[in-house]
Amino acid sequence: MVLADAVVNTGATVVPVLQQLLARRPGQLIVVSLVGQQEAAERLSLDFPDVHFLFARLSSNRYVGVGGTDTGNRLFGTFMKHQPQAAASLSSGAPDAGEQGLA
């Protein structure tokens, strides 16, 4: 069984899904992700030793969104309608405070 998640940042979203899938006793469970946060990837590997994790890229940066933004929004350039400042700063080319430190 393969579980795909575009971005694993803290692992908070993928953990309950893994628990539910493992309760069904799949033959083999593989998690594939485009980007994984390094510490979260290490913790998940320790917490779920029977699950194979494949990340296209590991990042040491951590980003937890404020006001509805999240790592997926940053990755795919999607913003919710109630975030005009974030969209404006993106279009102006100037990083907002939340973008500093991102890879």
Image (spheres, rainbow, N blue to C red):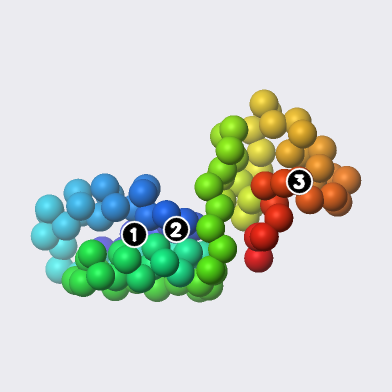
Q: Amino acid at mark 1?
A: Leu
- Report the residue at 53% width, 68% height from top: 60
Question: Which disc is residue 3 wearing?
Answer: 1
Looking at the image, is mark 3 or mark 1 earlier in the sequence? Answer: 1
Is residue 7 at least partly visible in the picture? yes
In the picture, measured across the screen, residue 100 lies left or right of residue 49, that is right
Q: Secondary structure at mark 1?
A: strand
The mark nearer the N terminus, 3 or 2, is 2
Instruction: Tell me how many marks there are.
Output: 3
Q: Residue furthest top?
A: 82
The quadrant in which the C terminus is found is bottom right
Q: Using the numbered discs, state the Cα–Cα distance from disc 3 to disc 2 in whole angstroms.
A: 22 Å
Mark 3–mark 1 contact, CB under 8 Å? Answer: no
Identified at 16% across, 57% down, the residue is: 22
The residue carrying pointer 1 sits among few (fewer than 14), some (14 to 19) or many (20 or more) residues within 10 Å by Cα, namely some
Give the CA distance from mark 2 to mark 1.
12 Å
Q: Secondary structure at mark 3?
A: loop
The three-letter amino acid code for the residue at tag 3 is Asp
Q: Which mark is residue 18?
A: none
Read off the residue under disc 3.
96
Of residues 1 and 45, the one drawn nearer to the viewer in this rendering: 45
Residue 66 is situated, as x and y percent measured from the top left of the image, at: 58, 38
Disc with the residue nearer the chain's start (2 vs 1): 1
Splitting the image into 4 quarters, where does residue 18 fall? bottom left
Between tags 2 and 1, which lies in front?
2
Residue 35, given in percent of the width and then of the height, sits at: 51, 65
**Residue 8 shows which numbered tag?**
2
Residue placed furthest toward the right = 92
